[in-house]
Image (spheres, rainbow, N blue to C red):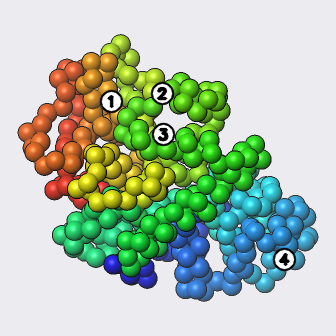
């Protein structure tokens, strides 16, 4: 078992991201530690701060009023305003812009779990006036820095593949407690933002969609097929997928193409941002030696851990999968600085001399590299 207080998150010093007349936005799924990270920073800060939550009706009334006199009175004597779950406050972006424009001595931090809501409210009003950080479930990068022993971290690989990396799940004492926490996350937190939307009245279609995605993990997804299986129109499927992605449950990976006729680009892959949530959706927590989806779990784990690494270490570029209609494929293509890097995920350690597919080599002879990611070398790739 890991000790939660010992796990140092990647953004330990939020103060280093605070800039004059800019809002610091901390995004992320529910229950990944945004509030804990914020509170820890505030306790160590020398600034006189005011910490509020967007769920407080009085605070919502003040901060959505656009009444500068009232807001100024509310902030008088403080150097820092911190708002947890800021997406609950109407017109929050416009009011934060008002604060940093008219009360420039005030620093502002806002956290939010509803990306689709908070981004819409904040994005346009605070164009070029914000710094955005995304906090994910605990990454292997963070855990390796914490324990500083690759061997010990690798011994827990099966736990991460099955139960994922949410903070309380990682530090739970028993298998039963991990399962209970994941079921609570799925039922009480993960879907809360989506089901609270005005036009989504029930959870059945959303859960059915998530189950379909869970069973198709690692495969290209057809919107038409999802539409037929769910008995809803394609536009609604697309909308639900977008909401699931913006609420940090899934993430989309598109197909790579340089306009070769044989390359598949009309479908996408969807990964879950946490293996435990994926397994919780389909209620499968059995050990790896009794599963037939170990390849899917491995692919999802490596993709999302690589996503965290690229986000935290600012490795800018685009990610894709690659496949032809002749079934030649590569799991991940990264395009960085005009160069192509290809990666294949293999759970079995028997592919040391594996080459990229012939069609890829012929079509992209200037590719930078091709690498197989397996249980022996994966930590180098994601940490």
Which numbered mark, 1 or 3, is in the foreground of this view?
A: 3
The residue depicted at 48 percent of the width and 39 percent of the height is 212
Q: CA distance from mark 1 to mark 3?
A: 22 Å
Q: Residue under circle 3?
A: 212
Label 2: few (<14), some or many (≥20) within 10 Å? few
Quadrant of the image for the N terminus? bottom left
Q: Residue under circle 2?
A: 222
Which sits in the foreground, 10 or 113? 113
Q: Residue under circle 1?
A: 322
Which sits in the foreground, 323 or 367? 323
Compare marks 4 and 1 and give the one earlier in the sequence: 4
Q: Are marks 3 and 2 in contact (CB under 8 Å)?
A: no
Figure check: 293 above or below 21? above
Label 4: few (<14), some or many (≥20) within 10 Å? some
Q: Position of residue 139 (x, y in %)?
A: 38, 63
SS at badge 3: helix
The residue depicted at 55 percent of the width and 42 percent of the height is 208
């Amino acid at each position: 078992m890991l000790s939660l207080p010992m796990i140092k998150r990647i953004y330990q010093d939020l103060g280093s991201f605070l800039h004059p007349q800019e809002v610091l936005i901390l995004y992320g799924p529910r229950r990944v530690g945004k509030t804990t990270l914020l509170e820890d920073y505030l306790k160590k800060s020398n600034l006189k701060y005011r910490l509020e939550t967007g769920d407080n009706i009085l605070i919502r009334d003040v901060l959505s009023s656009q009444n500068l006199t009232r807001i100024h009175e509310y902030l008088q004597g403080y150097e820092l305003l911190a708002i947890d779950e800021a997406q609950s406050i109407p017109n929050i972006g416009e009011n934060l812009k008002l604060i940093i424009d008219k009360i420039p001595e005030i620093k502002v931090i806002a956290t939010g779990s509803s990306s689709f809501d908070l981004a819409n409210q904040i994005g346009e009003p605070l164009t070029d006036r914000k710094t955005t950080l995304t906090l994910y479930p605990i990454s292997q990068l963070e855990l390796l820095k914490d324990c500083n022993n690759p061997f010990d971290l690798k011994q827990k690989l099966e736990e991460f593949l099955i139960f994922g990396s949410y903070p309380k799940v990682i530090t739970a004492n028993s298998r039963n407690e991990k399962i209970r926490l994941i079921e609570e996350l799925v039922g009480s937190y993960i879907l809360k933002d989506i089901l609270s939307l005005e036009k989504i009245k029930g959870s059945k279609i959303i859960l059915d969609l998530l189950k379909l995605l869970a069973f198709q993990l690692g495969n290209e997804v057809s919107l038409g097929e999802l539409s037929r299986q769910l008995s809803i129109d394609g536009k609604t499927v697309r909308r639900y997928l977008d909401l699931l992605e913006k609420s940090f449950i899934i993430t989309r990976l598109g197909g790579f193409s340089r306009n070769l006729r044989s390359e598949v680009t009309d479908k996408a892959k969807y990964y879950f941002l946490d293996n435990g949530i994926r397994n919780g959706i389909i209620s499968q927590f059995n050990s790896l030696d009794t599963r037939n989806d170990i390849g899917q779990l491995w692919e999802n784990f490596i993709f999302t851990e690589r996503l965290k690494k690229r986000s935290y270490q600012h490795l800018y570029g685009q990610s894709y999968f690659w496949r032809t209609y002749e079934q030649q494929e590569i799991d991940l293509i990264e395009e960085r600085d005009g160069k192509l890097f290809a990666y294949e995920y293999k759970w079995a350690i028997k592919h040391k001399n594996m080459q990229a597919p012939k069609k890829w080599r012929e079509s992209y002879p200037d590719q930078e590299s091709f690498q197989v990611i397996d249980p022996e070398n994966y930590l180098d790739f994601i940490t």
